[in-house]
Amino acid sequence: MTPSQVYFTDLRAKPGDNLLQKLERLMTKAGMGTIVFDGKYTAIKIHFGEPGNLAYLRPNYARVVVDYIKARGGKPFLTDCNTLYVGGRKNALDHLESAYQNGYSPFTAGCHLIIADGLKGTDEAYVPVAGGEYVAEAKIGRAVMDADIVISLNHFKGHECTGFGGALKNLGMGCGSRAGKMEMHSAGKPHTDRSLCIGCGACQRICAHGAPIMTDGRVTIDHDKCVGCGRCIGVCPRDAVLPASDESNDILNRKIAEYAKAVVDGRPCFHINLVMDISPNCDCHAENDASIVPDVGMFASFDPVALDVACADAVNRQPILPGSHLDDMCREHGHAGDHFHLSHPETNWRSCVEHAEKLGLGTQAYTLVTVK
């Protein structure tokens, strides 16, 4: 397979040429301007950051992407889907409030913010996965699927389940509705914490299969009736319905690749990874640990597989920062050559990119083109 081109620019700046200008130049050199944006709804998939986490991308970078699209007649919007876990982004109201706290607003970003799977994370489109081995139909936030074009703007960093998070994870896991996220994380079906249940019956009303059973004023899930759609998780006002979260990390990674395939198939897509503030864990944490390696730069490509592999290779070439989680792991276990695996030894990031390549999302082979 012919290697894909991945474009790179470093984080050096000088008077008259700042990082935002370099990002715009990177997008142009990488060919983003060849996409016909005129009159097209363009979803810019981003992570707004969990409150308390300071490693998420600043809205200044998103504004560059927004202005680039608007200058070409496009109709951009920033978007993300609600989280499966309990936190600051579990429903659209809390999610938008968190985005505002972290500096994202229509005024700073230059476009509207839309939570793609709706108020409670249940507004989803069922999208067939061509060639899928684990997912027949991905449950994707409806606003993402309503868009004509998808741009992923990704903070590249470590991750405790997938090894790292980049374009594929931001597209796959990030665009999944709450039920979609449960499908990726779980081999089983949801269950209830009866101590949290208030017996409101919301889960019973939304279930088409009669799986939630009320006994003594509290609900349990009948797994013989449950089909695992996860809609009960989204409507529970007390987070008493919980996902199984029992899928192996390798299968989780492959499901993420299949969800990413569902998101990008059949429409123009482009991907940008900012490899900076490389924390060991996801931006979904309400904190961020110290960076594990020095900042690297900005990367862009039409190929999300090549892009993620190029960024992983670049991070693995960096020295370990003293006092970081990775430094602790290195001193305790020695180094086997892969920063992400050493950071979280139970993970294998290659399972995602290998499966994505098998699905035809892209190639692991790349040519790196440096943009000054």
Image (cartoon, rainbow, N blue to C red):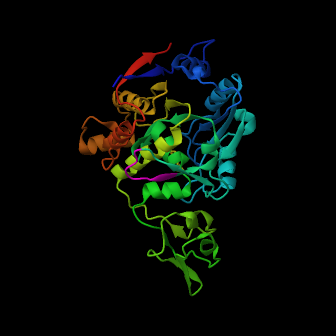
Between residues 8 and 214, which one lies in front from this camera angle?
214
Q: Is residue 274 visible?
A: yes
Between residues 93 and 43, which one lies in front from this camera angle?
43
Q: Position of residue 114 (x, y in %)?
A: 68, 45
Q: Where is residue 95 in the image (x, y as percent from the top left)?
A: 65, 51
Between residues 187 and 99, which one lies in front from this camera angle?
187
Residue sitting at x 65%, y 77%: 200
Residue sitting at x 40%, y 48%: 132
Residue sitting at x 61%, y 22%: 20
Q: Position of residue 35 (x, y in %)?
A: 59, 24
Specify start and end residues of the magenta stretch as a single range.
131-138
**Is 22 colored magenta in this rendering?**
no
Relative placement, left or right, of 32 versus 160 is: right
- Residue 37, compared with residue 222, is above or below; it is above
Q: Locate the N terminus and report the quarter of the image it occupies.
A: top left
Between residues 161 and 38, which one lies in front from this camera angle?
38
- Residue 9, compared with residue 336, is above or below; it is above
